[in-house]
Every structure is written in structure tokens, then in C-alpha cells.
Image (cartoon, rainbow, N blue to C red):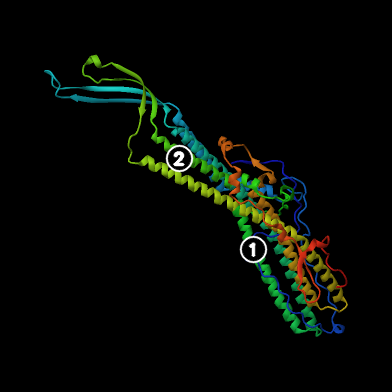
Amino acid sequence: MNFNKATPPAVAKPAPAVAQAAPVATQPAPAVSPVKPAAPAVAQAKPVTPPAAPAKAPATAPAPATASVSSANGGTTIYQVVEQTLLSNPEIQARYHDFRATLEGQNVARAGFLPQVNAQGYYGHEWQNHLPGDDSSQNWKRPGYNLELRQLLFDGFKTSSDVKQAGFEKLSRFYDLLSTSDDMAMTAVQAYVDLQRYRDLELLARTNYRLHEETLKQIRERADSGVGRRVDMEQAGGRLSLAQTNLMTESANLNDVTSRFRRVTGMSAPTTLAATPKVDEKLPNKPSNFDDSLRSNPSILSKQALLQAADAGNQSAKGAFSPKFEFVASSGTDTSQPGSDYRNVRSSNVQVMMTYNLYRGGGDSARIRQTAEQGYAARDVRDYTCRNVQQDLAVAWNNIIHLRQSLPYLRDHEVATTKVRDAYRQQFQIGQRTLLDLLDTENELFESRRSLTNALYDLQTAQFRWLALSHKLLPALGIRAAKDETPEENGKLAMTDDIIKTCNSTVADESRLDPVKVQYGSGNAPPEFVPANADGGRNAPAGGKW
């Protein structure tokens, strides 16, 4: 199935170095801040330059930029990656050929409405014995030919039901193709985001390792000069080992997602990636249900088409209990009698023929029961598919709301930790903080930026997944099929409101995700959790001297 790009939507500027993918390898445990040692005598301390600050995580999601196929810096865009995946992925190609096969299968069933013309020729020898009269036996050569035309008039609507069944099976394969395209597009998007995420996490881990390495070097210099303590050097060495482990884990994760990117897209991982586009405007504001998404989900539509195909198959089976009427016309020659007088005799006839089966061993009744059970199974498959999609939509939407609520607090944590780190750096210059104190804040800042990075890319992934489940991912990326091959049976698909109701299409209670704060009572009354916006807005982090 060919895909072309429509006018692409605005894409975001490349994200600063920090991003992550769906966990492919076990993520490293956060660096544990050890207990601070007692501050050494500052008066004798040798002046030391504080370590450089690590790379900063993005404060906001990538902002939109130009809508070109390639970004301004020449990086590969998500449009190129998804389009390449759709055009080259063998699973999509297999689904497309399945769809084309069912299209021809319907043509096979439709041929039952057209006349059949058969030509027959033969040559042989015939003997007749015990004839009346003197000549009691005869033999002669018997050549002949026959041309016959048969046209179906009525067969209990069996052929029309077969055509209808094949048509809905074709429609089901068409929606399977769309579903696979959505799934593979989402997989390509996930691989793209994962590659960005782990490249950025690897950069954060590498910067954190260099910071620990520089810190250990400076502590060793102080210990060698006699103004530092050996225990500080041992503690810094242990932290460096943990930072090295974290870096190795992130590098291994990056290798894993790079291999996955190559498998999914069929192309090597680009050196530079443009940032993913913002799709917030493609999402609903506060949906009360997911009915529209369920009605457009190809997986559900495919199962509904199979149900209607099974119903048509049941009607076809019932046609075996009706008589079959055909118009038959034939013409030919047959030397059915000896002698030259019968050699060139031509026989032609026109007739209406009825065929009615009286007994077939109970096979027709068994066929009806079989197709009825197939219909029941198809209905159950549709219902549980609908429930599964409803659950996936609810989980994706819940993740979107949760991450939207969490991001301001993660940003506040990152900003506050940055202020603490800067204050510690100033206090370190005047001897009020040790180098290990400063390293503690650097570790916390590293973890806060790592959490913020993951949340930003998790939100992008959740948004794209919700669009994929709603069959809106490819339009959101500006990609469309090269030609419309929607079967004509699509207009006969019966996705009623009653069917949607069986999916229990409800939205999870978003109030549970609202931020809260602790309100302390008087005396011995226990504290209570109240909405953070109860006083008109969320309190900003407390300021003051660090």
C-alpha cells in the first residue's frame, strides 16, 4: 500500500540533548547520595575550582518549527522515518496482499451470477448387442461435440450471500491493513522517540560521569597535599564507580534502541534527528467518553466486518434448502445410431432445469449450525476487542493527564535543585560547603533532570499512542494513502450505538490525578490532603536563603 505525505504539520525544533524511550533494557538505579562527611577545616583547604554544571534538561516540550521534510540542520524527521516504515515494512506488505487476495475472492463468488459456457468434444467406438431382428449386434465409430450454456436463475440467494460474505471479508482485511499501518507507524514513532530519549539520557549520564571524575581528581589532589581526608577520596571513588555503571547502562540501552530502530524502520539510525511535532491540538480537551475513537478504530471495524461476513455465510448455508433453477441451452452432434444417415444429425435444446436436493447425509443442517456458531464467535471477538481498545484508550489518556499534571512539579523540582546547587557552589567558595556537599546536590540535580526528561518524552509517547488508537496518527503526521481503496461494503458496516455501549466507553476519574497539599489541623488533629488549587492556585516553592 503506497503512502504519500500530505502537507506536514509544524514540527518541533530538535530537542536539547535529553530524551528516552520505552524501557528496552533495565534502567539504572538512581545514583544514591551517600551520607555527607564532616566538613574539613576550611581555613587550611586548598582552593579548588568547582566542577562544571552538567547538561540541562529541556524545560518544556519541543517547540514547533518549520514543516519541511528535513529540519533546518538537516536532521531526519519523523515523517521520513514513518513513511519509510510504511513503504518497506514486510508486515504491512503482507496485509496489503491479503487484502488484494480477498478482493479477487469476491470476484470468484460474483462469477456465479454470470453464464457458464462449456464446450465438449469426444471420439470413440460403440457396440450394441442383442438387437431385435436379423442383425443382433452392431458397432460404429461415435464422434461428436456439444456446446452448452448455463445461466443461474435462482439458488435460494446462496450466490448473493457468498458475494456478500466475501465482500465483508474483504472489508475486514482492509481494516486489518489500516490497523497494521497504525501499529507500525506507532512503533516507528516509538523507535524514533526512544532513540532521542536514550541519546539524551546517555549524554546526561556521560556528563554526570565527567563531573564525578573531575571531583575525584580534585579530592585526590587535596588528599595528596595533606589538606583533605582519605575517606572523602574513597567516597568520591565509590560514586565515580556508580556513575560509570549508570553510563554503561545508558549506553547499552542506547545500543538496544538503535538496533530496534533499524529493525522497525529498515534504515540505520540517523546521526541527527529532528524533534517530534507537537500534537496537543489534535487531542480532545475533556472527553466524556471515547465513542468517536472506538467508531474509527480499525481493529474494531475489522471484527465487525467479520461478524457481518459470518452472518452472510449463515444465509448462504440456508440456501442449500431451496431448489436451484438454471436456464440451459445446448447444441451439438452425436452419432448415437449406426449408419451414414445419423452421421451429421445436429441436436439443439433450450430448457429450464430445476435441481432440488432431497438428502445429503445431514450436511446442510450441520453447515447451518456451523456458520451460526462462527457468527457467535465473531460477535464475542468484536466485543472483547472493543473492550481492549477502550482500556488502551483509557490508559493512554490517563497517562496524558497524569504527565500533564506532573510536569510543572518536575520542572519546579529541577529549578529548585538548580538554585540549591548554585547556592552550594557559592558557599563552597567561602568554605561553608565541602566538595562532597556540592556533589550531593549535583547528584540530585542529575536525577531531577533525568526524571523531567523521561516525563517529557513519556508525554509525547502517550499522545501519539492515543492518536494511533483513534486512527488519527497518520493524518496528524501528514501522511495519507496514495489512492483510496476503501471497499464499497464500508457503507454497509453496522457500527451502531448499542455496539459502542458494550465497550463501556467511560473516562477514568481525572480528579484523582489533581495535585494535593497537606493541610494541618489544630492540636492533635491528623493532617488532611486537600486540592492544591483550593486557595486559588498552587503555591510556588518557598524562596529565601539556601
The image position of residue 478, as x and y in percent, is: 69, 43
Question: Where is 472 relative to 343, above or below?
Answer: below
Circle 1: element type? helix
Which residue sits at x=77%, y=46%?
66
Instruction: Tell me: 226 left or right of 317.
Output: right
Residue that carries the numbered disc 2 in the rendered image: 314
Q: Residue furthest top?
A: 341
Graded by Cα atoms within 10 Å as few (under 14), some (14 to 19) or many (20 or more), the crowding at tag 1 reads: many
**What amino acid type should be assigned to the residue bearing mark 1?**
Asn
Residue 474 place in picture, x, y as percent: 66, 45
Q: Where residue 475 sits: x, y (%)?
A: 68, 44
Q: Quadrant of the C terminus?
A: bottom right
- Which residue reaches farthest left? 134
Image position, residue 143 (x, y; %): 27, 22
| In this view, the mark in front (2 or 1) | 2
350 is higher (above) or lower (below) than 424: above
Residue in the picture at 83% in, 64% down: 539
Q: Is residue 36 above or below residue 186?
A: below
- Could you say which quadrant of the image residue 522 lies in? bottom right
Q: Amino acid at mark 2?
A: Asn
**Residue 130 occupies quadrant:** top left
- The tag earlier along the polypeptide, 2 or 1, is 1
From the viewer's side, name the closer residue of 11 and 265: 11
Q: Which is more toward the observer, 29 or 76?
A: 29
Residue toward you, 133 or 241 = 133
Return the residue at label 1.
253
